[in-house]
Amino acid sequence: MKAAVLDRLLRLRAAQRPVALLTDLASGRQALIVDGRAEGELQPGPDQLAAAVDAIQSDRSGLLPGAPESFLQVFNPPLRLIIVGAVHIAQVLAPMAALLGYRVAVVDPRRAWATAERFPEVSVLADWPDAALSGLGLDHRSAVVTLSHDPKLDDPALEASLKSDAFYIAALGSRKTHAKRIERLRARGIDEPGLARIHGPAGLTLGGRSPGEIAVSILAQMTQSLHETAPAASARATG
């Protein structure tokens, strides 16, 4: 690997940006695939580039389809989960998500709840959710779950999330609570495609009621959404 390519790769990884290294195994020429474009001496064709972008979205390294001499090594930043509401379910959900490889942040301006003692080894932001989420730079590897049951916290968080490419957006609450939430967001100008992105009530219907069981259902639905949305994200990146 040439020094310039390595330096660029290290800088992109330090900036937490998705990137992949494409190598022609026959010639040794390389390129970095960043933001749907190739940088370097190797210039893949349109089909190869599209396959590379899809592989980045899917977090899948290997030989490119139809190009047996082109190997792609994907370097994605960690998946992220932003939890709005430092409640009891969040205390269970945060460490479980961390075990799955997520970088977790808990957002709640109520400083009595949002403490390092209640959420050890997790980033805790005592900011209002709309400001916090805007500053986090949500992308297609981000998930947002609102758990506070407080419209003053959950609604702004959902609005901010819908402006991003977050692959999973969910809100805890009963169907009746969610229906009221949808009406409030619709009144604030959120269109129907945007409202349809919100999983509510959050989580797959597994029948559990304890904080741990609810956390499992949310993580299961999040995992399902992650793998279902990868092709769609790839289409957006190459369109």
Image (cartoon, rainbow, N blue to C red):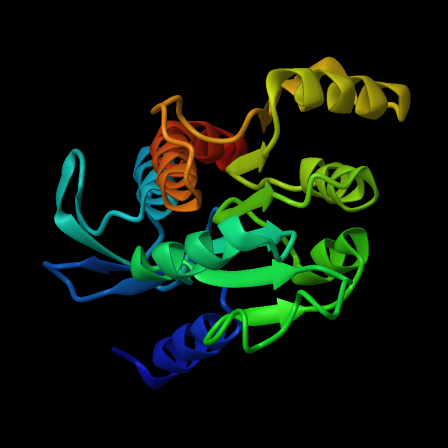
User: Residue 140: x and y, percent?
Assistant: 52, 44
Q: Residue at x 68, y 41 (%)?
A: 161
Note whether 61 is above or below 160 in the view shown.
Answer: below
Left or right, 81 with reference to 192: left
User: Residue 214: x and y, percent?
Assistant: 42, 38
Note whether 233 is above or below 4 in the view shown.
Answer: above
Left or right, 1 with reference to 96: left
User: Residue 230: x and y, percent?
Assistant: 39, 34
Quarter of the rendering occupied by the N terminus: bottom left
Note whether 198 is above or below 115 in the view shown.
Answer: above
Left or right, 176 with reference to 4: right
Q: Residue at x 28, y 64 (%)?
A: 30
Count of picture labels: 0
Q: Quadrant of residue 190?
A: top right
Left or right, 229 with reference to 114: left
- Residue most extreme to the bottom: 3
**Is residue 66 visible to us here?**
yes
Q: Quadrant of residue 157?
A: top right
Out of 232 and 112, give the one closest to the viewer: 112
Out of 18 and 190, give the one closest to the viewer: 190
Q: Residue at x 60, y 61 (%)?
A: 106
Q: Quadrant of residue 220?
A: top left
Note whether 117 is above or below 193 in the view shown.
Answer: below
User: Residue 182: x and y, percent?
Assistant: 74, 20
Quarter of the rendering occupied by the C terminus: top right
Out of 56 and 66, give the one closest to the viewer: 56
Out of 86 and 229, give the one closest to the viewer: 86
**Is residue 38 visible to us here?**
no
